[in-house]
Amino acid sequence: MIEMENLGPPNSENPIPRLRFAHLPTPVEELSRISERLGGPRLFVKRDDQTGLAFGGNKTRKLEFLVAQAKREGADTLVSAGALQSNHCRQTAAAAAMFGMDCTLVLTGTPSARPDANLLLDKILGARIVHVLDRADRDRVLKETCDAAARAGRRPYLVPYGGSNPAGALAYAFALEELMEQIGRGETGGRVPDYIVFPTSSGGTHAGLTLGKRLYGYPGDILGVSIDESESWLKDRVSALASDASELLGARIEFDHQDVLATDAYCKAGYGVLTDPERRAISLFARTEGLLLDPVYTGRAAAGLLDLIERGYFRKEDTVLFWHTGGQPALFAEGYASTLDRPSGDSDRYSSPKTAASNR
């Protein structure tokens, strides 16, 4: 049985509830073959694709806090929203099933005749699906869905998009504490990573890592590769969310734009659009390390990482940790699967890295 625990400052009137169901700590592994192929830097990966909840992913950490809050409030239904192939929604549906709750998902996009990948898993997990064709209508439909559930006698809890509210972000502050403990045990070869690189979108993971850096003394840089948002939006969102999350632990810590490192150089194609750089990154990680990325988040972030390496952003002697946020079920979505078996053309591109001045 999973017991509720409470976190937060001593004698707090509003302790932070948590249900521990993620498979933690997730492993840290060295990507020695890719590092050798690229000629440096030394690469590691943090495997949050192995958090254990219905194929895992980064949202599982956040749901430990969000489902706990829902249970504390007496909710019997989780309601959330995302894209048609949302990893967040798949994990939300699984968490609802685990704790005997209903789940309704508001998903944007046109479904195929036969549900596949994450959408298929949503249905297997028992979620009720509300389809919205235009993303501009999603917030309105989400509110209407919550209101309708309440009128029908349910007790809905609205899980924020991407699990990205202060409590959800707090999960990744603790995730950075977990990583610092692994570094202390020598799981990164006795070296503290100079950089942590990961995909960022709704800002919760980014904010949590930013807060964790301050709380647990991580000395390196935390670089979010944007999946769909502008750098300025991310700086606004992440700094505000990290500040709000800090307050849950006691005294508020104010973060500003200078505390947030992000790049929007790799998201111009748009959300969920699979281009050649993502395809090459997915192929390289799979064929060199046997490591599967997803076509939307980690594929795009890895493509950014590889481009930064190629352009000399990192020094060859640096250590870089890639935080794998999961999402592999989307590989089986019809729109992606039909293009991923094409030749990637990566063999020449990644055999002889360029040399350039470091940005550091």
Image: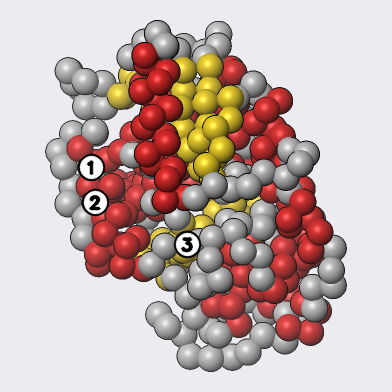
Q: Residues within 10 Å of mark 2 (few under 14, many from 20)?
A: some
Whole-number angstrom distance, CA of label 3 to CA of label 1: 23 Å
Residue name at image x 73 percent, y 83 percent: 349
Task: Return the x and y of residue 117 as percentages of the image width and height.
Answer: 72, 41
Q: Is residue 15 left or right of residue 17?
A: left
Write down the residue under mark 3: 228
Write down the residue under mark 1: 244
- Examine the rendered structure and indicate whether residue 53 appears above or below residue 345: above
Amino acid type, label 2: Ala
Whole-number angstrom distance, CA of label 1 to CA of label 2: 6 Å
Q: Is residue 125 visible?
A: yes
Q: Is residue 236 left or right of residue 107?
A: left
Amino acid type, label 1: Asp
- Identify the mark at residue 240; answer none if there is no mark: 2
Q: Quadrant of residue 300?
A: bottom right
Task: Return the x and y of residue 88 as percentages of the image width and height.
Answer: 53, 39
